[in-house]
Amino acid sequence: MNLWNKLMCYSRRRSPWLFHMNSGSCNGCDIELVASLTPRYDAEQLGVRLEGSPRHADILCVTGPVTRNAVGAIKTVYSQVCGPKAVVAIGSCPATTNVFIDSRTLDGPLDKHIPVDVYVPGCPPRPDAIVQGVARAAQILADRAANKPVVEVKAELPTEEVRQ
Ligand code: SF4
């Protein structure tokens, strides 16, 4: 790997930019995502930044159980994030469609439509769990950019140190 690629891997791991997409959530997870960026949980100290355009982002964070209306937009936004990219499913809704499982307005879960790299469980998940999920996605990005094998992590709960 040349110096430029090493620098890119380092930046991806140390400063992941996020794009947030709501696929029909109740807003509980969205509020927790915003809380994770506030000074109390301070994801920005890890270099995390919320971006307004998927074209500038490295990580796509999806909340909500994936309504039929949202499917097209999810696929479009996913295709607009430049590679290497990672997807974080925030909350139980995108992972399983949660309590809305039998709704005829849904077409979830999320991994039916796009590949998901990290699942952050909870309804809603705590901000520290979201920070941990994003940190894991940043590591996956760096591994992908370096062509290293990525270890699949389906669910991660915050450790005791992160909770304090
Ligand atoms: S996981 Fe819970 S809090 Fe999050 S969008 Fe679904 S119902 Fe709302």
Image: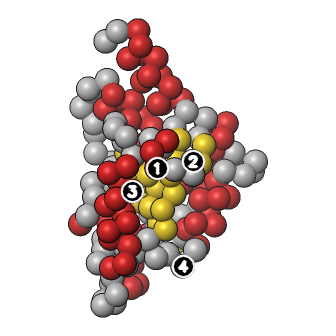
Q: Nearer the viewer, mark 1 or mark 4?
A: 1
Residue located at (55% from left, 68% from top): 29
Is 22 left or right of 42, judged from the image as shown?
Answer: left
Residue drawn 69% across the image and 45% down it: 42
Q: Is residue 141 visible?
A: yes
The mark lying in front, picked from 2 and 4, is 2
Q: In the picture, which quadrant includes the N terminus? A: top left
Which mark identifies residue 77?
3
Tag of residue 51: 2
Q: Is residue 93 visible?
A: no
Q: CA distance from mark 2 to mark 1?
A: 7 Å
Q: Which residue is mark 4?
A: 26
Please name the amino acid that badge 3 sits on.
Answer: Val
Residue pointed to by mark 1: 54
On whether ligand 1 comes within 8 Å of the CB at mark 4, the answer is: yes
Identify the secondary structure beneath mark 4. Answer: loop
Q: Quadrant of residue 137?
A: top left
The residue closer to the viewer here, 84 or 38, is 84
Marks 1 and 3, the one that precedes in the sequence? 1
The reply to whether the C-beta atoms of the residues labelled 2 and 1 are less than 8 Å apart is yes
Q: Are marks 1 and 3 in contact (CB under 8 Å)?
A: yes
Residue drawn at (59%, 59%), measured in percent from left and top?
33
Q: Earlier in the sequence, mark 1 or mark 4?
A: 4
